[in-house]
Amino acid sequence: MTRQEAFNLLSEYTKKDGLIKHALAVEACMTVYARKYGEDEESWGIVGLLHDFDYERFPTVEEHPYKGAEILREKGAPEGWIIAIMGHAEYTGVPRDTLMAKVLFAVDELAGMVTAVALVRPSQKVEDVKVKSVKKKLKDRSFAASVNRDDILKGTEELGITLEEHIQLVIDAMSSVAAALGL
């Protein structure tokens, strides 16, 4: 599957602008991490782009990401992509045995938090977001309350990096696609 085919699939199943922007943010994060670890940037980016493609149509824990996995299998997507996508939802019980799966889990919720922090800045620009601001907002459970802080911390731990390094990588990745994110 090419990046364009993946984007077309995302666009077919996802109409909400916020969900498309989230997919683009996670794609950028996955690409930066692939570069950091010497992995295939296009494949990792596609996994980030598609991780929630089924969410708008199938938002329940009984359906997401299970329906997406079925659709991706029908389209011949690599099983490693599907397992990583399944593992990004903690409740599936699918272990994150690959670096790709660990990174997807680690960046998903953090990309949402960085977006929320950017939106409350006067400039509303992701490039103006500072690591210390994200860390401060992580402690405020009423801010961006739907962001799962436990997943962010667990994902960071699974990667074996510091929270500060992880946050900075996500900010940098999202800054590289800021125009597409409206940030």
Image (cartoon, helix red, strand yellow):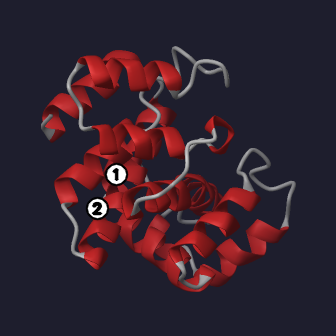
Q: Quickly name the residue at label 1.
A: 27
Residue 31, label in figure: 2
**Element under disc 2:** helix
Residue flagged by tag 1: what amino acid is it? Glu
Q: Residues within 10 Å of mark 1 (few under 14, many from 20)?
A: many
The answer to whether residue 3 is seen in the rendering is yes
Percent coordinates x, y for residue 116 in the rendering: 63, 55
Q: Closest to the observer: 161 or 169?
A: 161
The reply to whether dot 1 and dot 2 touch (C-beta < 8 Å) is yes
| Number of callouts | 2
* Residue at x-position 44% and y-position 54%: 101
**Element under disc 1:** helix
Relative vertical location of residue 12 with respect to residue 109 in this rendering, above or below: above
Look at the image and tell me in which quarter the N terminus lies: top left
Please indicate whether residue 134 sits to the left or right of residue 51 in the image. right
* Residue at x-position 54% and y-position 61%: 106
Residue flagged by tag 2: what amino acid is it? Thr
